[in-house]
Image (cartoon, helix red, strand yellow):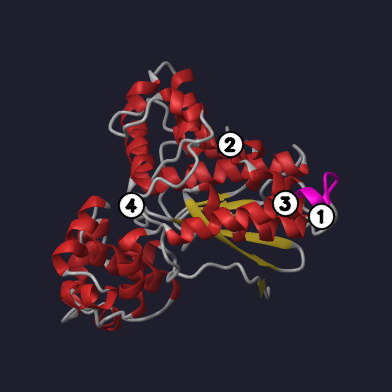
Amino acid sequence: MTRQESHVRQSPGRMLPGFAQRIFPPHSIAAIAAELRDQGIDPSEVLEGTGLVIGQLESHTTRISYRQLDTVIRNALRLAADPAIALRSGARMHVTAYGMYGYALLSSATHAEARDFAARYIRVVGPFCDFGLSYDRETVVATFQPIHWPNPTESVHRFAVEFALAAHLTTIRDRSGQGFGFSRVLLDYTPPPSAAAYRDLFGCPILFNQHHCGYEYARNDGPRALADPRTHAMAREMCEEILGEVNRAGGVAADIRRILIEQPGRYPSIEAIAEQLDIYPRALRRRLETEGTSYRSLLSEVRMRLAIEYLRKTRMTNEEIASRLGYSDAANFRHAFSRWTGRSPSEFRGDEGL
């Protein structure tokens, strides 16, 4: 089956948004807090360590960072007795929770326009996952990539994917009707304790240990009942402004990630990067510290992301990957990969079905 790739498919080199910048609305944290509250857990426990109070989640002026979202995810994983907490939280994400982004989706002229808008502007809502789209004549394929949690062996990665899957299902049903459903769901991890809840929520085949995360459904490019060109144009213009703000607010860590990704295997020192960014090395280290990271952490993150991409999507040998990532030999790469993921490269590639 030949697929026609759309222009919105993401690449591993896309710049990541900042981890510490408070630039996103708090709707995802609000959904997690509300779900845990309904399960008998005080919201203040969910927000512990974020500097937020529950009243701020109801304010349209509140902005959150991925660092705060990461803290909430880890709190939820620690506090919740329900293994499906991420799925249930994500299912609360109705299209109206997304502000102008949601109104732009509802007022799109066609289903095809709504899909492309959703992928192009997803960063404005502070999503758990980026996603890209591809098509054939009858099927839409959405592929997920967690933004700040790339390691498929970690519970925070699974939480991000589960939340995003459930949120996508809810919002598409809000736009297309309750009869909408996925034809299958694909996950890049082993079956979790919440696997039974997947079947209940999605009602379609669930494939684990795949080379990517995402879902598929029957393609419909036709007109939408709530189409309104004036509302859509206004909402799109506002989303374009917000997307520009998000792209500008990535922080110095985002600049360093970009530099490292653009030069795989020839990673410059922090002193060379500081010179490139016209910052004193000591000042650069301080700015990274305020963003909750370091040069060493960023280099490790970039290497891990690229290693996962190479193992998933190429047939490069361990020696070739080691060279591409700047390791002196394959043994050092294997040790690093096992430290990141708990699996050797060959085990990971075998699990991915390549």
Range covered by the magenta-colored residues: 224-231
Q: Which of labels 3 and 4 is toward the front?
A: 3
Dividing the picture into quadrants, the one containing residue 253 is bottom left
Q: How many dots with numbers? A: 4
Q: Is residue 279 above or below residue 146?
A: below
Which residue is the site of mark 2? 93
Q: Quadrant of the C terminus?
A: bottom left
Q: Amino acid at mark 1?
A: Ala
Which residue is the site of mark 1? 109
Q: CA distance from mark 3 to mark 4?
A: 42 Å
Q: Which of labels 4 and 1 is toward the front?
A: 1
Q: Which of labels 3 and 1 is toward the front?
A: 3
Q: Which of labels 2 and 1 is toward the front?
A: 1
Q: CA distance from mark 3 to mark 1?
A: 14 Å
Q: Give the structural element (helix, strand or loop) at label 1.
A: loop
Q: Looking at the image, which is closer to me, 347 or 74?
A: 74
Say whether residue 324 is left or right of residue 243.
left
Q: Earlier in the sequence, mark 2 or mark 4?
A: 2
Residues tagged 3 and 2 counted as in contact (Cβ below 8 A) = no
Q: Residues within 10 Å of mark 1 (few under 14, many from 20)?
A: many
Which residue is the site of mark 4? 153
- Residue 199 locus on image (x, y percent): 57, 39
Which residue is the site of mark 3? 234
Residues tagged 2 and 4 counted as in contact (Cβ below 8 A) = no
- Residue 190 locus on image (x, y percent): 40, 50
Residue shown at 24%/75% (left/top)? 273
Q: Which of labels 2 and 4 is toward the front?
A: 2
